[in-house]
Image (cartoon, rainbow, N blue to C red):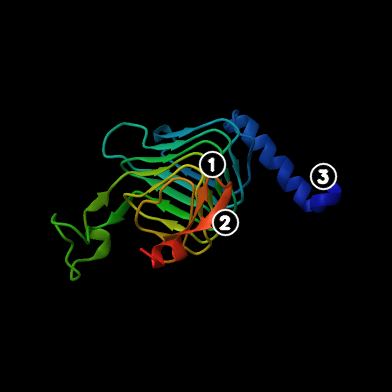
């Protein structure tokens, strides 16, 4: 470990291991600093691993658990997940650095409900929420944002710097802002096949 991380890195890792075993016994490793807000509303599965600077927060309107992390979830540095209604992260999900996942926003900007007016102060606008589900075996690349109302299907991959505004089916690769499916896994051929070319002929 000393050869891999150096003296300072090894000391930091040792402190993180002690912190993990004292405060999050079922986790694998929580690297410090780690910010968790309203922990009683957050469920953490076995073998959670985090990078440095991760932030988990829950702000439910009623006294219920709203942020659920499955087993073997791994998140890299500076991941921010916030839940008001419901955010569920499935088993074996891999999250790269600087990813933002949220089921809520300040105000509502679409649909037929009470739309937020641009002349109001953003912080005073009523919070709007819609549940987020990230199913098992999903891989989310760096700098991705996952916004309210989204489901990312089992086994899918979200490319770096994507903004996920609509649900992504299982076994797909999606990229872009807004994120769109570009490939889907074909279980017959056992290959990731392009959805772009297929859509050009439909």
- Report if residue 178 is visible in the image: no
Q: Residue visible at 58% across and 51% down?
A: 191
Q: Residue visible at 52% across and 56% down?
A: 193
Callouts 1 and 2 close, C-beta under 8 Å: no
- Residue on which disc 3 sits: 1
Q: Residue visible at 60% across and 51% down?
A: 76
In the image, 110 versus 189, the foreground residue is 189
- Residue on which disc 1 sits: 137
Q: What separation in Å lies between label 1 and label 2 (alpha carbons)?
A: 17 Å
Q: Earlier in the sequence, mark 3 or mark 1?
A: 3
Q: Quadrant of residue 28?
A: top right
In the image, 74 versus 2, the foreground residue is 74
- Residue on which disc 2 sits: 97
Q: Earlier in the sequence, mark 3 or mark 2?
A: 3
Q: Earlier in the sequence, mark 1 or mark 2?
A: 2
114 relative to 61, above or below: below
Q: At which x and y percent is residue 112?
A: 13, 56
- Compared across the picture, whether 197 is left or right of 5 comes to left
107 relative to 89, above or below: below
Q: What separation in Å lies between label 3 and label 1 (alpha carbons)?
A: 29 Å
């Amino acid at each position: 470990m000393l050869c891999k991380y150096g003296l300072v890195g090894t000391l930091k890792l040792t402190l993180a291991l002690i912190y993990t075993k004292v405060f999050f016994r079922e986790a694998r490793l929580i690297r410090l600093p780690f910010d968790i807000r309203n922990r009683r509303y957050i469920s953490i599965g076995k073998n959670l691993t985090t990078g440095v600077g991760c932030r988990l927060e829950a702000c439910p309107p009623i006294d219920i658990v709203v942020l659920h992390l499955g087993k073997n979830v791994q998140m890299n540095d500076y991941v921010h997940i916030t839940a008001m209604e419901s955010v569920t992260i499935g088993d074996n999900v891999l999250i790269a650095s600087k990813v933002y996942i949220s089921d809520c926003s300040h105000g509502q900007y679409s649909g037929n409900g009470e739309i937020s007016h641009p002349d109001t102060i953003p912080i005073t606008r009523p919070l709007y929420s819609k549940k987020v589900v990230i199913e098992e075996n999903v891989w989310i690349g760096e700098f991705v944002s996952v916004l309210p109302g989204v489901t990312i299907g089992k086994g899918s991959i979200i490319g770096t710097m994507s903004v996920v505004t609509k649900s992504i089916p299982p076994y797909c690769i999606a990229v872009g802002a807004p994120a769109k499916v570009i490939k889907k896994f074909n279980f017959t051929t056992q290959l990731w096949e392009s959805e772009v070319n297929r859509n050009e002929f439909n």
